[in-house]
Image (tube, rainbow, N blue to C red):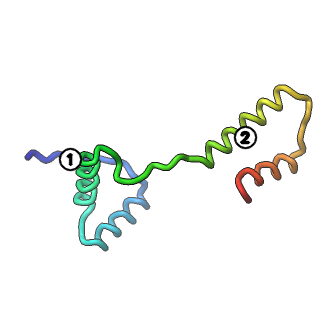
């Protein structure tokens, strides 16, 4: 079977940490990536769950609501009210 080179761009810190992980479990990066590819092809799906980004969806929805209100009412808010509302949304 012919082997080809696959070039992938990753964050430098992630690469270093991934190389260390692979070393710790007794393999190299190439072996780990090949295992990933084989698992995807065998299962015909990613070998992990891709989670819904509920947090960002919630923030986006709240921003749309705020934009609608801003465009359709004369009510205005202070910076403190806006900050408090944002903190409530993100749970701080």
Mark drawn on residue 57:
none
30 vs 82: above or below = below
Q: Secondary structure at mark 1?
A: loop
> Looking at this rendering, what residue extends furthest in the front direction?
43
Sooner in the amino-acid sequence: mark 2 or mark 1: 1
| Labels in figure, total | 2
Question: Residue drawn 91% across and 34% down?
Answer: 75
28 over 59 or under it: above or below: below
Q: Secondary structure at mark 2?
A: helix
In the image: residue 75, left or right of residue 31: right
> Of tags 2 and 1, which is closer to the observer?
2
Q: Residues within 10 Å of mark 2 (few under 14, many from 20)?
A: some
Quarter occupied by residue 25: bottom left
Real-space Cα separation, disc 2 to disc 1, in angstroms: 45 Å
In this picture, residue 12 sits left or right of residue 80: left
The circle drawn on residue 62 is 2
Q: Which quarter shows the C terminus?
A: bottom right
Q: Is residue 2 left or right of residue 24?
A: left
Residue 71 locus on image (x, y percent): 82, 27
On the image, the x and y values in percent for residue 19 come to 33, 65
Instruction: Please tell me which residue is depicted at 24% across the width and 56% down the height of the picture.
Output: 35
The residue pinned by badge 1 equals: 5
Q: Residues at badges 2 and 1 in contact (C-beta under 8 Å)?
A: no
Question: Residue 48 location, x and y as percent?
Answer: 39, 54
Circle 1 crowding by C-alpha within 10 Å: few under 14, some 14–19, many from 20: few
In the displayed structure, 78 sits above or below 15; it is above
The outermost residue toward the top is: 72
């Amino acid at each position: 079977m012919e082997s080809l080179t696959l070039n992938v761009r990753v964050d430098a810190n992630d690469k270093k940490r991934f190389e260390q992980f692979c070393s710790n479990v007794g393999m190299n990066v190439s072996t780990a990536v090949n295992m990933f590819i084989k698992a995807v092809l065998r299962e015909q799906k990613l070998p992990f769950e891709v989670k819904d980004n509920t947090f960002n969806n919630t923030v986006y929805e709240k921003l749309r609501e705020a934009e609608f209100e801003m465009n359709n009412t004369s009510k205005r808010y202070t910076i403190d009210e806006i900050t408090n509302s944002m903190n409530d949304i993100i749970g701080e």
